[in-house]
Amino acid sequence: MPNYLEWSRAYTGRIQEEDAHKRQAKAQALGDRLHKEMAEGILPFLTMPYRKRMEEDLARVLPVAQNYRHMLLLGIGGSALGCRAIQHAFAPGQDLPNHTGPSVWVVDNVCAEQLEALLGSLSPKETIVVTISKSGGTIETLSQYFLVKQWLKEALGDAWHRQMIVVTDLVKGYLRDEAKRLGLASMEVPDYLGGRYSALSAVGLLPAAYLGVDWKGLIDGAASVAKPLVDNPASIATHPAFALASWADALMERDYSQLIFFSYIPKWAVYGPWFAQLWAESLGKGGKGSQPIPATGVTDQHSINQMFLDGRRDKACLFVTSQNNPKGRAFGDDLPEKWSWLRPHAFGDLLEAEALGTKMALCQSKVPLVELSMADSDAYAAGAMMLLLEATTVFTGWLMGINPVDQPAVELGKRLANCRLGATGYTQEEADLAAFFATKKVEQPF
């Protein structure tokens, strides 16, 4: 069977099908906008004009990277979340005992202890370093780059640059300047490709290819979902991404303020944080948006599912399943009589039954739910899901009347942090910091 969306329980509680149908009147205008923005190169995650160059660069860079046992990836947010999701989904051996193959270690936070632990454990001679920043000026990533460059230099001397790859803007930014000045290997983050939409570019596919993941399957699966929109933007009216966007926008109009991403494909659990950034950073603007909540089946049945089922009625659910989950070991006949009903089953049957039970419980609790039923849990299927959710996010933003590809509030925090560390050119931020520290603290010991 193909991948499909299952809609029979999408419209319940306060939301009715006509709420989403009202959005159909906007389809033609959004189709015209889609045509215009694709022509202007603003939506490269759909059109993928970078693919040919990326494949050429991979053919050049990958053989060098694969000479090393470890890849240390420096990046944050969209520069790391897609890579982490792909690694957990398609190279899970790294997380298992006695792993001897290639490993990717992601440094995606400002944590001195974590960085020291990695640099103290990894051998520089066995490590290729990949630094990822679209702008080339992300302070967290650059701070990691400066320290890791020093670590490589101390061990390798002048040869350090052979073990550094930068993934950044093609022509501008500090990392691009470094690549040109020092002769570092590099790959491109294309124009208009923001971090949260970049997992299926060099940002996510270089580490995927290094790990031996079917990276072509990922991008081919994505292209299969994008193709109808690229070939005929007017087809947005019947595209599953627009149907999901119409549902999501209608939910927010009816005061559903939280959207659960409930994955019952265990290997894909880390796609939850990837989706959370995509949705929150794209749509949380101007007092609008819904809060994404990553959840893992069956783990979160025993933790936060109580809130989903019996808490405030402000939640809807994207429920992700596979039509081909592995069955695993059979239970067999050597079971106590009390559990004899398990004897005909395999371990994977339990996952299927738990998914059905949770889905039914959510529906009985009037949680609007759309099931994303994936034909398989391979790379092609994952790429298809990723593109579907990226397109859904953009179309939802358009329906909301906000820009889904910027993040103005996030930039404020970055400017304040830079100012605090002594960067110049932040006059307003200096005043804001002074006012902040002038406020008397109210402290309560515990």
Image (spheres, grey):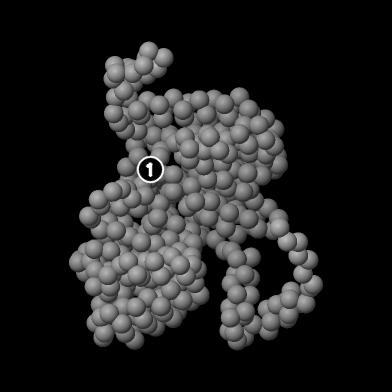
Q: In the figure, is residue 64 to the left or right of 46?
A: left
Does residue 273 appear in this view? yes
- Binning the other alpha carbons within 10 Å of mark 1 as few (below 14), some (14 to 19) or many (20 upward) gives some
Does residue 214 appear in this view? no
Q: In the figure, is residue 106 to the left or right of 215?
A: right
Residue found farthest to the front: 446
Q: In front here: 298 or 122?
A: 122
Give how far across and how far down residue 232 sits, in percent: 44, 48
Give how far across and how far down residue 140 sits, in percent: 49, 72
Q: In front here: 123 or 444?
A: 444
Q: In front here: 75 or 401?
A: 75
Give how far across and how far down residue 47 sits, in percent: 40, 57
Give how far across and how far down residue 185 sits, in percent: 29, 75
The structure residue drawn at horizontal position 31% and vertical position 74%, both measured from the top left corner, is 164
The structure residue drawn at horizontal position 51% and vertical position 59%, both measured from the top left corner, is 36
Disc 1 is placed on an element classified as helix
Q: In front here: 147 or 185?
A: 147
- The quadrant in which the N terminus is found is top left
- The quadrant in which the C terminus is found is bottom right
Rendering quarter of residue 338: top left
Q: How many marks?
A: 1
Q: In the rendered view, tell whether residue 330 sits above or below residue 376.
A: above
Q: In the rendered view, tell whether residue 129 sits above or below residue 90.
A: below
The structure residue drawn at horizontal position 57% and vertical position 57%, both measured from the top left corner, is 282
Q: In the figure, is residue 190 to the left or right of 154?
A: right
Kind of residue at badge 1: Lys
Rendering quarter of residue 329: top left
The structure residue drawn at horizontal position 20% and vertical position 66%, both measured from the top left corner, is 67
In the picture of the structure, the residue carrying the numbered disc 1 is: 267
